[in-house]
Amino acid sequence: MGIYDVFEGGSQPFDKAAWIAKKNEEKQAAYELADSTADRMKTDGTAFRSYLDVQGRFDRYSVTNAILVTAQKPDATQLKDYKKWREDGVTIDKGATKITILEPGNEYTRHDGTRTIYLMFQNEYSANFLHTLWKRVRKYGAFCTGITQNVEDLLQSHTARTMLSNSELLVMLNQSGNDMDRLAELLNISNTQRSFMENVGPGQGLLKVGSSLVPFVNQFPTNTSLYKLMSTKINE
């Protein structure tokens, strides 16, 4: 669903208010379609597997857009707007069916190309779907991994708090004061256990494994090729 439409030719003046109203209607319809599709996937294993296939092919797409593709054309392999297809020398058949997705936003991306999981909870639809995925994916022989440096922001979401408290494995590295307080309250971390996440170096922290909390120290050699591949520090 492109925001930057091009208007040229024609004798009618461009009605900006009408265009905005139309785009808002299209966006609302897209959200409703994503919501109803996500609800169906909660109980329909075939639909859920179809979503996983789509998300695998369009791994750069948001959860919401992958759900929208699943709802409209789950066998799609490439999606481009009209202008891009023409630039690639492809003729659009008359009467071709369009696929509606949402215009990407300016989400924060780290220098290594990854995004923090808390962004998923800023949208009701992606948050609810991620919650369902988090609970069901192990039934299909898979698992979910999330990472964030914004613990306080993440825990403002009730859905995120429920997911964290029910997760089998959490790796908690050095934490700030506010983040520490939130995690301690959620996971019943004692003052002694908190000390393993406070003012500690890289590779040190606290593991939550099932109902157990285990301190760890994993100081990986920094003079190895593997460290250079794994490090996310900009100056390295």
Image: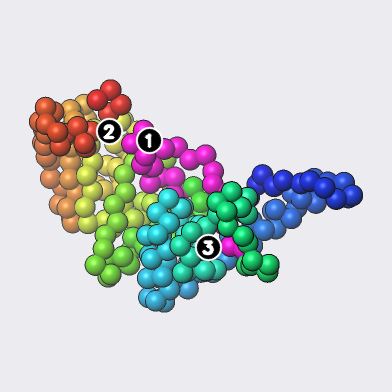
Who comes first in sequence, dot 3 or dot 2? 3
On-image quarter of the C terminus? top left
Of helix, strand and loop, which one carries label 1?
loop
On-image quarter of the N terminus? bottom right
Label of residue 110 in the image: 1
Residue 51 horizontal/vertical position (percent) = 42, 66
Label of residue 232 in the image: 2
Who comes first in sequence, dot 1 or dot 3? 3
- Residue 194 visible within the image: no
Front residue (pair 134, 29):
29
**What type is the residue that disc 1 sits on?**
Arg
Count residues near mark 1 (Cα–Cα under 10 Å), then give few for <14, some for 14-19, many for 20+. few
Side of 189 where 177 appears, left or right: right
Where does the magenta region start and end?
98-121
Report which quarter residue 192 is drawn in. Answer: top left
From the image, tell me which residue sits under label 3. Answer: 68
- Mark 1 to mark 3 CA distance (whole Å): 26 Å
